[in-house]
Image (cartoon, rainbow, N blue to C red):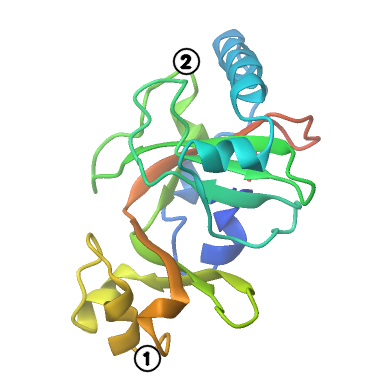
Amino acid sequence: MMRYVALSLLAALLATTSAFADQDQKYAGPLSASEKAFVDGVRADLMQRFPTAADAEKAGYVRYTNADSTGAISYANFHWTSANAHEPSQLWYDKSGKLMGADFSVPYTKGAARPKMFGVNPGRWYEFDDHVHYVLHDSATGKMEYDKYVMAPDFTKAGGDPAHPTADDLVKMHKVKSAADVSAVFDMPAIWDLVVWLRPNPKGEFHY
């Protein structure tokens, strides 16, 4: 979590980008009965389907971060609408490749109400701004570089289309020397994101 993108995840990555535009509306209270049922169901399902990072990769998830302060390494499948509890947009693993948690997401529309899904308090969801991620690969050494990103306004200003980013765009922006060095590039559009810890977390199951 990110998240990972926890995870992701993305908290450390986006802490300086105003990604958390709605902090005054967050909710961090104890789990309700419906929230506990959701977390228990997701844990049982994902621990069986994606116990290791290799399982995530086989299902189309792509690593795009280093380990964050929680030890989580994030993988995304580029599908940003989690229609149900079986469709996480991101999974995150520890350095041994064991599953730690997942993110669920739905598109963010400015001014729209927070998501009311899965029996989870709407205040559990975080808003992330549109940004483009990319991963580099050194063909000579095999070294991978993660945690690379460009915010959407900067990507657009440079002449690229954040919704359809390419390695050539990154070359034009002088982010990379060669398109061949880019192993993955993708847009993470503006989304509402729900972090779910599948392992015990003293700060709570929905805590970034």
Q: What residue occupies the far front of the structure in this picture?
A: 140
Amino acid found under the numbered disc labelled 1: His
In this rendering, the count of numbered labels is 2
Q: Say if 133 sits above or below 6 in the image.
A: below
Residue 174's disc is 1
Q: Does the image show residue 63?
A: yes
| Residue 56 left/right relative to 131 | right
Q: Say if 181 sits above or below 198 in the image.
A: below
Q: Nearer the viewer, residue 154 or 23?
A: 154
Q: Nearer the viewer, residue 21 or 34?
A: 34
Q: Position of residue 91 (x, y in %)?
A: 57, 40
Q: Nearer the viewer, residue 69 or 29?
A: 69
Q: Say if 165 sits above or below 70 in the image.
A: below
Q: Say if 189 sits above or below 40 in the image.
A: below
Q: Position of residue 102 (x, y in %)?
A: 58, 36
Amino acid found under the numbered disc labelled 2: Gly
Q: Who's the residue at 71% across and 32% down the image? A: 204
Q: Who's the residue at 41% across and 55% down the image? A: 21
Judged from the image, the secondary structure of the residue bearing numbered disc 1 is loop
